[in-house]
Amino acid sequence: MTTPHYNKLMDSLERQTKLARSFVYLLDQEQAALQVMGMAQLMKISKQKESGIRQITYLDEQIQETMQDMLPETRETAIKLSDFASTLPAPEASELDEVRTILANLRKQIDEKNYVNYNFTNDTLQYINDAIGLISDNVGTEPIYSARGLGKAVNRSPALISRAV
């Protein structure tokens, strides 16, 4: 027999799963926008990612609170879903484990896609810095753009010694 706390937990986990799926989709959109350097789209996606992260964090806290309400002796510690499932009757434990597995797989996809997008961004930034360096004849100097996209101070004064080989 399910309890109101269990129903609340499963509702939160279902919302968390939907949010994770939409985040995976958002990261796919981000990758496509990175490939075409669609800056307007990337800015929009960045704002959506911030909002999604806030929602995921809120749901994580809500899930923890619900589990702690169901197991008051764990009030001071974070509870893993896998550990919590062992305290439930078999049907609920099985259902929770199934949702936990889906959520874990989605989070793994999020980590992988975020890693790919991060590396793509850094590689592109390095390429841009190299191209600017070649154009401005500053090969081997500090990058012109930082990892945060802000300009760096670059010495544009003429060199006393020619760099031409």
Image (tube, rainbow, N blue to C red):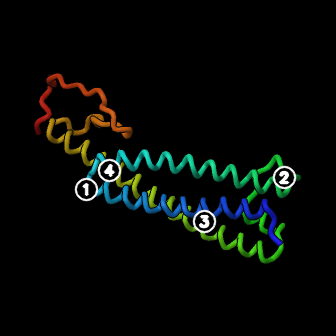
Front in this rendered view, residue 60 or 139: 60
What residue does disc 3 label? 103
Gap in angstroms between the C-alphas marked 2 and 3: 23 Å
Gap in angstroms between the C-alphas marked 1 and 2: 49 Å
Quadrant of the rendering where the N terminus is positioned: bottom right
Which badge, 4 or 3, comes first in the chain's sequence?
Answer: 4
The numbered disc on residue 41 is 4
- Kindly indicate the quadrant of the structure image that contains residue 20: bottom right
Which badge, 2 or 3, comes first in the chain's sequence?
Answer: 2
Q: Secondary structure at mark 2?
A: helix
Which badge, 4 or 2, comes first in the chain's sequence?
Answer: 4
Gap in angstroms between the C-alphas marked 1 and 3: 30 Å
What amino acid is at disc 3? Leu
Which badge, 1 or 4, comes first in the chain's sequence?
Answer: 1
Q: Label 3: few (<14), some or many (≥20) within 10 Å?
A: many
What amino acid is at disc 1? Val
Does residue 66 appear left or right of residue 24 in this picture? right
Q: Label 1: few (<14), some or many (≥20) within 10 Å?
A: few
Gap in angstroms between the C-alphas marked 1 and 4: 10 Å
Gap in angstroms between the C-alphas marked 4 and 3: 27 Å
Q: Secondary structure at mark 3?
A: helix
Which badge, 1 or 3, comes first in the chain's sequence?
Answer: 1
Quadrant of the rendering where the C terminus is positioned: top left
The numbered disc on residue 74 is 2
Residues at discs 1 and 3 in contact (Cβ within 8 Å): no
The numbered disc on residue 36 is 1
